[in-house]
Amino acid sequence: EILLSCAYEQTGQRDKAVETLQIDMYQKVIGLIADAQKFLMLHMHEEVAFRETVQRMAAVSDCFRLDQLHPMTMGNLYYVAALGFLSQESREEALDMLERFAEVWIQTELPVRLHGDGYFDKLDGWFKEFDLGDQAPLNDTVIKKSLLEALSPESGVGELAGDPRFELLVRRMKNKLE
């Protein structure tokens, strides 16, 4: 992509050069988070690597405002982190991650739409070129059902049922989604 961007720049198409780089950067940062999610799954019982990955990916998310830009990816990461912390018997950290998970979805307007922001200001046109346009690949009904199931007593985090922090975030999610 760097070569393509340089070619655009050399032909006087600065906006196209910037758009090409933004798309590439966006894809790479989202890819990093997706890779980290799998990395977390493979390292759930290796506490040091797990914790370091969670900390680094949270910093990446905060830096690029990924909770707002790509809530599905970040929600998945936080949920996997919560599962990992539970497997390490770190309930408080699991709850911290579930609170981030819930906050992502409480702040996200449905239907989910792909979009840029003030930094990634050249992405919206690119998203419109997708087969689904800027719409998420899952419809609202499926997203809501999946989110509520993720916090149900039968889920991987069901052991937290009864904990006041957990019950509060479940209520907040239900208020948002029902």
Image: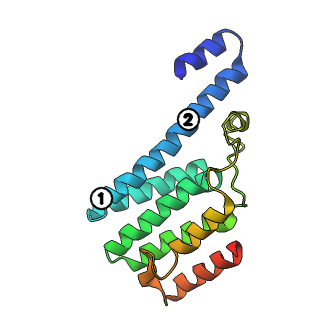
Q: Could you tell me residue 146's position as x and y percent?
A: 56, 67
Q: Does the image show residue 78?
A: yes
Q: Amino acid at mark 2?
A: Met
Q: Nearer the viewer, residue 128 or 163?
A: 128
Q: Is residue 121 above or below residue 135?
A: above
Q: Could you tell me residue 134's position as x and y percent?
A: 70, 44
Residue at image location 35% in from the left, 59% down from the top = 41
Query: How busy is the neighbourhood of tag 1: few (under 14 within 10 Å), some, or many (20 plus)?
Result: some
Number of residue marks: 2
Real-space Cα separation, disc 2 to disc 1, in angstroms: 26 Å
Residue at image location 68% in from the left, 64% down from the top = 107
**Image coloring type:** rainbow
Q: Could you tell me residue 152's position as x and y percent?
A: 51, 79
Q: Quadrant of the N terminus?
A: top right
* Numbered disc 2: secondary structure: helix
Q: Amino acid at mark 1?
A: His
* Numbered disc 1: secondary structure: loop
Q: Is residue 132 above or below residue 61?
A: above
Tell me which numbered mark, 2 or 1, is placed earlier along the sequence.
Answer: 2
Q: Which mark is residue 122?
A: none
Single out the residue that lies furthest toward the top.
11
> Is 75 placed left or right of 171 in the picture?
left
Q: Which residue is mark 2?
A: 25
Q: Which mark is residue 43?
A: 1
Residue at image location 68% in from the left, 33% down from the top = 126
Q: Nearer the viewer, residue 69 or 49?
A: 69
Residue at image location 55% in from the left, 35% down from the top = 25
Q: Could you tell me residue 158's position as x and y percent?
A: 45, 81
Q: Does the image show residue 102?
A: no
Query: How busy is the neighbourhood of tag 2: few (under 14 within 10 Å), some, or many (20 plus)?
Result: some
Q: Quadrant of the C terminus?
A: bottom right
